Amino acid sequence: MLEIKDIHKSFGNNEILKGVDLTIDKGDVVVILGPSGSGKTTLLRCINFLERADKGTAKFGELEVDLKNASKREVLEVRKKTAFVFQNYNLFNNKTALENVMEGLVIARKVPKDEAREIAKKALDKVGLSEKYDSYPSQLSGGQQQRVGIARAVALNPDIILFDEPTSALDPELVGEVLNTMKEIANEGTTMLVVTHEMGFARDVANKVIFMDGGVIVEEGSPHDIFVTPKEERTKRFLRRVLPGSFDYEI
Amino acid sequence: MLDFEFLIDTFFVALSGVPVAILVTVVALLIAMPIGFLLAMTRINKIPVLNQIAKIYVSFVRGTPIIIQIFVLYSFLPIVINMFFEKYNIDYPVYDIHPIWYAFVIFSFNTAAVLIEVFRSALSTVDKGQLEAAHSVGLTTAQAYRRVIIPQALVSALPNLCTATVNLIKATSLGYAISLQEITLRAKVEANFGYNYLEAYIDIFIVYLILCILVEQLFKYWEKRLSRYKVASA
Ligand SMILES: Nc1ncnc2c1ncn2[C@@H]1O[C@H](COP(=O)(O)OP(=O)(O)OP(=O)(O)O)[C@@H](O)[C@H]1O
Ligand SMILES: [Mg+2]
């Protein structure tokens, strides 16, 4: 459903992505792990053109685009097929929760307002924010803001939702509510590509785990493959660091 | 002692100049806002050439007294207009052009430069994540600016916009230099008859004071309305 080939991206002389290939099927929950600076965010951002890659192609079902030279129209097409959940939520500060969710539906997808409002309410209900339709982001906790962010993505009914460390900016006690929300939408069959440091989520929810380092995919496989029987030395070293003591964890 | 009758009569004379002052202010703002906004965008996005021009323009306007800008433009514009008229065989006496047209140009020119910096700093207060989020849900950059970024930038621009507007109103008093029949000139002409300058100046003083206080209140009210979303954090 999503097929990415040979993404390259440099900032100045610094090559951040050195040829990444990625295939995601409908309903997949793919988790990307990797040390800081390995290019995980950059990869996600190149997929929906928040960043222009230097090279590479992406195929969303029928739609195939050149990640470097895509036209404005193609960029908008791709963005209709994707949604993004940001590390620091990036809710529209001047809009209520409901308006945040409606914005892309009404303005970009030209859904009639009344219909969009119903869709948006359903999405907010799903993430447990039925009480907060009319709250502005400044009135919501971090966890609630991120759940609005997820509702905003879900409401668009995209082919895939890209998550960039959705829980990293949250206070520890708020991480759980967001992970649970993500788990629920994963269980509904939403296709998700998730960058996270939450190993528990990777183990329990992902059906595919990718380990990135230095701008390349070092190893990929099922959670079992990666967490229990990693083959690459770099993967093992990374896991020892992030899962101290629980390296022999059995699924 | 003060001539109270004159003071009161002249107050209304000064007051009769208010519409002109407001007209010049509003027109200058309407012209300067889009220009200031576009040039602010060229500054923010570092568009070559235009960025440099905007920079020079701003330092030129900032680095010279308004009264000198008025004299320069007031002497310079007729020459340009004359050349233009001659080239296109327009038969209109340049020196019959009403001074208010010069006022529009001069004050737009001055205010646009001020607004470049006002808008530039206001736009920079909006996190770039807002544009990215708008892009990610499928908005074009123009839609993102209209619906998300400008509404937020406007809120932080309002205090400076208010200052710029008040300064502009006060600056229109210099319109007397180009024979513009605004507040100051009208009151001064009254004073010329009997040398009641003190009374006339007191009237001018009061009229500007009232005008500027009203404008400030208006902006405060506007800011309050627009910043409703900034409710105390939860
Ligand atoms: N806009 C940019 N300009 C210059 N360098 C950048 C830019 N964005 C990212 N980089 C650099 O690219 C490298 C990879 O960044 P990226 O954010 O993709 O890593 P990451 O894997 O997401 O790391 P983290 O886990 O810390 O989020 C970093 O060294 C970063 O400094
Ligand atoms: Mg990152």
Image (tube, coloured by chain):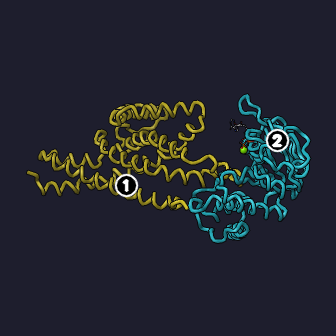
- Relative to B127, does residue A232 appear above or below in the rendering? above
In the picture of the structure, the residue carrying the numbered disc 1 is B216
In the picture of the structure, the residue carrying the numbered disc 2 is A212
The disc placed on residue A200 is none
Chain (yellow):
B
Q: Residue B127: where, in percent of width, then height?
A: 59, 47
Q: For the residues tagged 2 and 1, is the chain the same?
A: no
Answer yes or no: disc 2 within 8 Å of ligand 1: yes
Residue located 14% across and 54% down the image = B6
Quarter of the image with the C terminus of chain B in it: bottom right
- Relative to B56, does residue B23 appear above or below in the rendering? below
Chain where mark 1 sits: B
Q: Quadrant of residue B48?
A: top right
Chain where mark 2 sits: A
Q: Secondary structure at mark 2?
A: strand
What distance separates the C-alpha of mark 2 from that of mark 1?
A: 56 Å
For ligand 2, give the image quadrant: top right
Q: How many marks are shown on the rendered structure?
A: 2
Q: Secondary structure at mark 1?
A: helix
Neighbor class of circle 2 (other Cα within 10 Å; few <14, some 14-19, many 20+) is many
What amino acid does circle 2 point to? Met
Chain A: colour as depicted? cyan
Q: Quadrant of residue A121?
A: bottom right
